Amino acid sequence: ETIVKLLYNIGSRKEVEQYLRHFSSVESQKFAVIKVGGAVLTEELETLASALTFLNRVGLSPIVLHGAGPQMNDLLEKAGVEPQYEGGIRITDANTLEIARKVFMAENLKLVDALERLGTRARPIPSGVFMADYLDKSTYGYVGKITGVNKEPIESAIRAGALPILTSLAETPDGQFLNVNADVAAAELATVIEPLKIVFLNEKNGLYHGVTGEKLDVINLDEEYEDLLKEPWVRYGTKLKLTQCKELLENLPRSSSVAILSASNLHKELFTDSGAGTLIRRGHKLFKYDSLKQVDPDKLRRIMEAEDLTIKRHEQSVASYLQSLQQRQKVTIYTDEPGQVLAIIGQDLNDPSKPAVLEKFLASKTAVLNNVTDNLWSAIQKDHPKLTWKVNASEFANGMDRSWHFERSDGSLRTPQDDSTTFFYGINDPAQVKTLFD
């Protein structure tokens, strides 16, 4: 209870409880795979251990996999061995492999010890999870390509109430250890586990725009991937990470997402709508229509019958509402591929100065938890610089409570007579604002 109360300090009670229910709704091992960069183990060990302990205290069991690149480079330098790379892959000879094994074991135990000092049970699993063949022995030496994942050591640890702490060392069928890049191993593990979250912890706390220097809060791959790759600043590590995330998420349920952030921001990323680092998700491709004739009426009917309270309370039928839309001169309809969100916006063509009116904004619980609503809202803001909308008290549902609407508006007015609230954004003229409430 104390831990949950502490979580309320980083987000609203509703946010925290919503995400706790979401993460607790799946099997323990399907919560999250967290990949920890070697630099994090050196520079943020206590912060990391505290963050993982926090998750453990609220009943969550992340699977932790760590690298040890910087530590390995330091030892190789002391041994007089210059690291060699081919195509971005570390060439691993017998001497390098022996150093890698020692480093991985030392770093693995270091994290386990840090967790247990905080009273969190942790189990070191330096090997035995990843099976591999040689990637190309003549070129890379003892570097592996993962061919299988053994989940039993992970599941055994979780059943015993311990956090599984893995390295990316793999083994061939005859027991030869092979070095595998930790990011690659984390992706392979996630493909088998299918967790809700795949977290890559680094010291930078996310991905950044190469021109403005601003952090990229959210990337919806279905909508943005192709355009991002055309940007001249998307190259080298950024391009590689985006490509890896796309390949990973394409093989996972749409409910899975990738987060790139620092250890100190792990709680905020997981338990608040605003997040903290960079969230990468497939999202749902959004479609915009300027005419009702362009839209599949069965899709509209399905989401309205499932999510529209005026329809569910029989205050209006889907058929009568759609018929009224056909009479409009200007209407914009947004929906997504699977039909989990719907927005309908009307505009008065006789008076273009009037702000557009958001008549319906519907979303399933799954769409809210996967932040499809934020993607939809961004599209609406881009197309409509001025907007007003009215929400009745009974319509604050599915995670879109009053705070959700307040955060997206410039102002609002509550009407006591029917307990509704009118919101608006983009309207700077006081006289025009006044007309909204007359």
Image: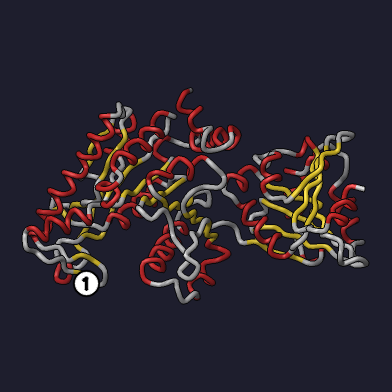
Q: Is residue 292 above or below residue 252?
A: below
User: Does the rendering let one see residue 302?
Assistant: no
Image coords of residue 309 (percent x, y)? 79, 40
98 to the left or right of 411: left
Residue depicted at 86% across the width and 61% down the height:
354
Residue depicted at 85% across the width and 62% down the height:
347
Q: Is residue 392 above or below residue 253?
A: above
In what element is the residue under mark 1? strand
Outermost residue on the front side: it is 430
Residue depicted at 84% across the width and 53% down the height:
433
3 to the left or right of 331: left
| Mark 1 surroundings: few (<14), some (14-19) or many (≥20) residues within 10 A | few
Which image quadrant for residue 95? bottom left
Image coords of residue 123 (percent x, y)? 25, 34
> Foreground residue, 185 or 317?
185
Image coords of residue 71 (percent x, y)? 19, 53
99 to the left or right of 126: left
> Foreground residue, 109 or 406?
406
Q: Is residue 343 above or below residue 113?
A: below
Residue depicted at 48% across the width and 23% down the height:
1
Q: Which residue is mark 1?
A: 86
Q: How is the image coloured?
A: secondary structure
Q: How many marks?
A: 1
Image coords of residue 174 (percent x, y)? 13, 52
User: Does the rendering let one see residue 352?
Assistant: yes
Label 1 amino acid? Glu
